[in-house]
Image (cartoon, rainbow, N blue to C red):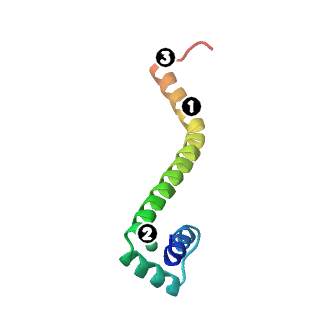
Amino acid sequence: MNHACKQASYLASESLDRKLSLSERLRYQLHLFMCHNCRNFRKNLNMIHRITELMRLSDTNKAELSDAMRSRIGDRLVESGCQSDQ
Ligand SMILES: [Zn+2]
């Protein structure tokens, strides 16, 4: 990996954590325009980032939904007269 690609991969991961400065963005975009490997790297990095975000969100939603869902299911069971004798 050459120096420019190392810089670009650094900026790619930095861009996930913070907003890049104008000069960083220009440098990064210019490099991406010229370098196929770094375009692939960014695509993969973004995909991994999105997947981990989705996993984090779905875990949160599951935890938040469980109580609400339980009471809603309970209500439905009462409405339909199917409540168990527990
Ligand atoms: Zn590169």
Asked if ligand 1 lies within 8 A of label 3, the reply is no
* Residue 29 position (above or below residue 49): below
Q: Locate the C terminus by quadrant.
A: top right
Q: Which mark is residue 70?
A: 1
Neighbours of disc 2 within 10 Å: few (<14), some (14-19), many (20+): many
Three-letter code for the amino acid on which mark 3 is drawn:
Cys
Task: Identify the secondary structure beneath mark 2.
Answer: helix
Q: Earlier in the sequence, mark 1 or mark 3?
A: 1
Disc 3 target residue: 82
- The front one of 73 and 65 is 65
Q: Amino acid at mark 2?
A: Cys
Marking on residue 38 = 2
Depth check, front residue: 11 or 53:
11
- For label 2, being within 8 Å of ligand 1 is answered yes
Residue 63 placed where, x, y %?
60, 41
Q: Nearer the viewer, mark 2 or mark 3?
A: 2
Outermost top residue: 85
In-front residue for pair 31/71: 31
